[in-house]
Amino acid sequence: MGRARLLVAGTALGALALSATAVAILPVPPKLRFGEDAAIAFSPDGTRVAFAGLGNDDNVDVYVMSLSGRDIVRLTDAPGTDMEPAWSADGGHLAFVSTRDGNQEIYVMAIDGSDQTRITADGGFDDDPSLSGDGSEVAYVSMRDGNPEVYLAPTHGGPARRLTVFAGVDTSPSVSPDGRLVVFQRGPAGSQDIWLVHADGTGLRRLTRASGADVGARFSSSGSSVRYLHVRRRGVVSTYEPWVVPLSGGPARRVRASRV
């Protein structure tokens, strides 16, 4: 199972989680509600999920639980909203977004909720975190310069690097397992494509050119390919098709999704 961040929708049974590699119906634990933007994320070993949940205190915090809905653990308990958890490849850390200090910023913590560390400290809107394989860097989207661009920052202190300069919209970055590459989606809603850039901001290239929208790009565990969802809209109905594109060259191909 990859480090897929998931598209989520509420259902009568729980939360419908859809990624480029899996589909799952996750039960809603008692006394806890999934929001419409729960941003559920599978752990790298596929045994747990992290998500943003609304607890009894009506505060949105980050939780971790097993796929059965048991063994739920609340990891954050701060004023404001904590959301959009993203796993490190070793399963030892989570990056997340928080408004606890009055502005939407990126934080990182250990998987037991300890060592919650603020990574960004700017006046802009920071979103979409993705940790590198060893957890030493986090990619994210920031509005600090007035436009959504992709940045990469060390998790143990130091300045962030701006990786993209684009008049449109760059969102949803994901760092390769070796930390050398970042994929992201570029374009307005409904017509995004997947792009790739080196961690130093060089080597920008476009990976997909299909009609419709390509979203949710994530590297394979080996880092040799990128998986993503191709969205086809027919009237009011949208379908999500898992695709993969090799980084060594060659066309993208549709893959069959597995079930959790």
Image: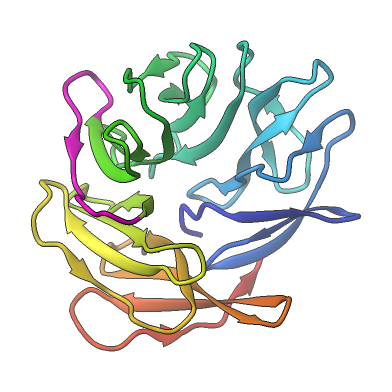
Asked whether 176 falls inside the magenta stretch, the response is no
Indicate left or right for 12 with 223 as reference.
right
Give the image quarter of residue 206. bottom left
Above-or-below relation of 114 to 140:
above
Residue at figure coordinates x 35%, y 84% from the top left:
252
What type of secondary structure mainly makes up the magenta span?
Answer: loop
Asked whether 143 or 232 is in front, the reply is: 143
> Residue 176: which quarter of the image?
bottom left
Stretch of the chain drawn in magenta: 154-168
Q: Residue at x 51, y 69 (%)?
A: 190
Locate residue 11 relative to residue 8 in the image: left or right. Answer: right
* Residue 42 screen position, x and y as percent: 57, 49
Count of all numbered marks drawn on residues in the image: 0
Magenta segment: does it hold 155? yes
| Residue 81, x across and y down, in percent | 61, 23
172 sits left or right of 139 in the view: right
Of 204 and 3, the residue lying toward us: 204
On screen, residue 145 versus residue 111, left or right, reads left
Check the image and report above or below for 84 versus 238: above
Q: What residue is at 21 percent from the left and 47 percent from the top?
A: 179
Q: Residue at x 35, y 36 (%)?
A: 143
- Residue 91, percent from left and from top: 45, 38
Which colour scheme appears in the figure? Answer: rainbow
Is the C terminus in the top left, top right, bottom left or bottom right quadrant? bottom right
The residue lying toward the viewer, choosing from 70 and 55, is: 55
User: Residue 71 at x, y = what percent?
Assistant: 74, 32
Q: Which residue is at the front of the view, 136 or 229?
A: 229
